[in-house]
Image (tube, rainbow, N blue to C red):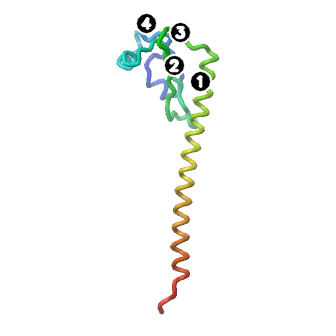
């Protein structure tokens, strides 16, 4: 399994590192020192196969995540990606509704104003 932090997650792959201090390929040392964690799990949030974010979980002690826990976090990440996409779609519909309302208002203003012939 790859040990680079950002790359695999943004390629849509789960990253699970049982002990970052014992892993010579782990390169995000500054974050480890600041966060004081030993075990890390990164699960991508995917929208139609494209990563839109990463859900990261850490543990201060060396205690690997179980397959069941990884599956649960993956499910949660999928649901979070769906929720994010729903908000994006809702905001898009709201913006379009405002545009249409403004167009309708301009149209009715013109249609209701007396003509100067």
Q: Which residue is mark 3?
A: 63
Nearest to viewer (mark 1 / mark 4):
1
Q: Nearer the viewer, residue 56 or 46?
A: 56
Q: Going from the N terminus, do you reach mark 2 or mark 3 first? A: 2
Q: Secondary structure at mark 1?
A: helix
Q: Going from the N terminus, do you reach mark 1 or mark 4 first? A: 4
> Image point 54% across, 50% down: which residue?
91
Q: Mark 4 and 2 residues: CB-CB less than 8 Å, in contact?
A: no
Disc 1/disc 2 C-alpha distance (Å): 9 Å
Q: Nearer the viewer, residue 85 or 48?
A: 85
Image coords of residue 27 (percent x, y): 38, 17
Q: Is residue 1 left or right of residue 75?
A: left
Nearest to viewer (mark 3 / mark 4):
3
> Image point 41% across, 18% down: which residue?
35
Residue 73's label in the rendered image is 1
Disc 2/disc 3 C-alpha distance (Å): 11 Å
Q: Going from the N terminus, do you reach mark 4 or mark 2 first? A: 4
> Image point 64% across, 17% down: which residue?
68
As drawn, 79 above or below 112: above
Q: How many marks?
A: 4
Q: Mark 1 and 2 residues: CB-CB less than 8 Å, in contact?
A: yes
Residue 41's label in the rendered image is 2
Q: Secondary structure at mark 2?
A: strand
As drawn, 45 above or below 100: above
The single residue placed furthest to the left in the displayed view is 30
The single residue placed furthest to the top in the displayed view is 22
Crowdedness of circle 2 by 10 Å Cα count: few (<14), some, many (20+)?
A: many
Q: Which residue is mark 4?
A: 22
Q: Nearer the viewer, residue 24 or 59?
A: 59
């Amino acid at each position: 399994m790859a040990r680079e932090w950002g790359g695999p997650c943004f390629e849509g792959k789960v990253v699970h590192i049982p002990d970052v201090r014992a892993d010579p390929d782990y390169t995000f040392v500054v974050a480890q020192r600041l966060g004081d964690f030993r075990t890390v799990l990164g699960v991508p949030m995917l929208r139609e196969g494209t990563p839109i974010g990463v859900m990261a979980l850490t543990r201060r002690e060396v205690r690997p995540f179980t397959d069941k826990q990884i599956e649960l976090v993956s499910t949660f990440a999928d649901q979070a990606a769906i929720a994010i996409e729903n908000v994006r779609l809702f905001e898009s519909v709201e913006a379009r509704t405002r545009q249409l309302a403004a167009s309708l208002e301009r149209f009715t203003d013109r249609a209701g104003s007396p003509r100067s012939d």
